[in-house]
Image (cartoon, helix red, strand yellow):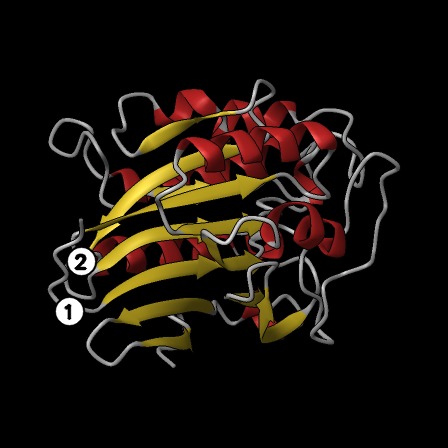
Amino acid sequence: RCLLTGTPYTIVHLPDSQTLVESSPATFHDQMQWVADHVASDNLVFLSHVGDVVNDPENILQWQSAEAAISLLDGNPNTDPDGLIPYGVALGNHDYDDIDTHQNASQFTQYFGASRYDGKSWYGGSSFDEFNHFQLFSADNREFLHLTLEWEPRDSAITWAQGILDAYADLPTILTTHAYVDSTGVHSTQQLTPDGRSGTGVFQDLVSPNPQIFMVLGGHFGGERHQVSLNGSGSEVIEMLANFQGRSPGNDGFLRLIEFDPNADLVNVTTCSPTLHA
């Protein structure tokens, strides 16, 4: 059902922005401005923020700074009703009202809840608590499903995600969840909540049983990692960690570009900094 043209297209993998909005908001603004400016020239088709939007969830200025920067992707509402590029923002452990708990996420749902995406044709919907969202986007005449899943997903999040996967069972799917692969290259076993799942649990309960999930993106753990796992059907799942908070000032502004090249049958990954031009 797909008429492929072989045109390369790119997904932006946006790492934790928490220290940027806390200490280098101009750098985060520059990242989003770079994406907005390069949507057409670089054929950017989707942006996925892996979570930890802010560092201090009680600091309203951090939320406002993050919201202002990400709003650059929306373009002019009068001329760009769908915005400049579809995007998803995952819920990280620093985005809950009480860090490292599932207690509430009132600021996250205020700034990045379902109402943010009103009128966007690519937005699919959210779970009842607006902690999990899904989006649909197209590239090279192929439609994709993207899921953002809360940090250390609870049973309710997994059940919700499975329902969306069942409803769009014919679509190749990318999953973004905050803590999944750690810097040693394994599915994380860290679990800070009694009702949540580690990266290992997410793989076992959602990724492995659903072969349509071909890529998982995450952050949280410092560093970078790439690995390929085999799901329950024996298909490959590309899994990546990107979190540059340990780098010098403002994380150096690095973000990750994931280019799909249909002609070469390759996925090419580049890590670049709009701030350093490097």
Residue 273 position within the rendered picture, expressed as x and y whole percent measured from the top left = 41, 72
Choose between 249 and 209: the one closer to the eye.
209
The structure residue drawn at horizontal position 42% and vertical position 30%, both measured from the top left corner, is 167
Q: Tell me if I can see residue 215 in this picture.
A: yes
Whether 168 is drawn above or below 146: the answer is above
Q: Are marks 1 and 2 in contact (CB under 8 Å)?
A: yes
User: Looking at the picture, which amino acid does disc 1 mark?
Assistant: Gly
Residue 200 position within the rendered picture, expressed as x and y whole percent measured from the top left = 75, 56
Whether 26 is drawn above or below 275: the answer is above
The disc, 1 or 2, on the residue closer to the chain's N-terminal end is 1
Label 2: which secondary element: loop
Q: Which mark is residue 6?
A: 1
User: Looking at the picture, which amino acid does disc 2 mark?
Assistant: Asp
**Measured Cα–Cα span from mark 1 to mark 2:** 7 Å
Residue 191 position within the rendered picture, expressed as x and y whole percent measured from the top left = 84, 49
Which residue occupies the extreme front position in the image? Answer: 233
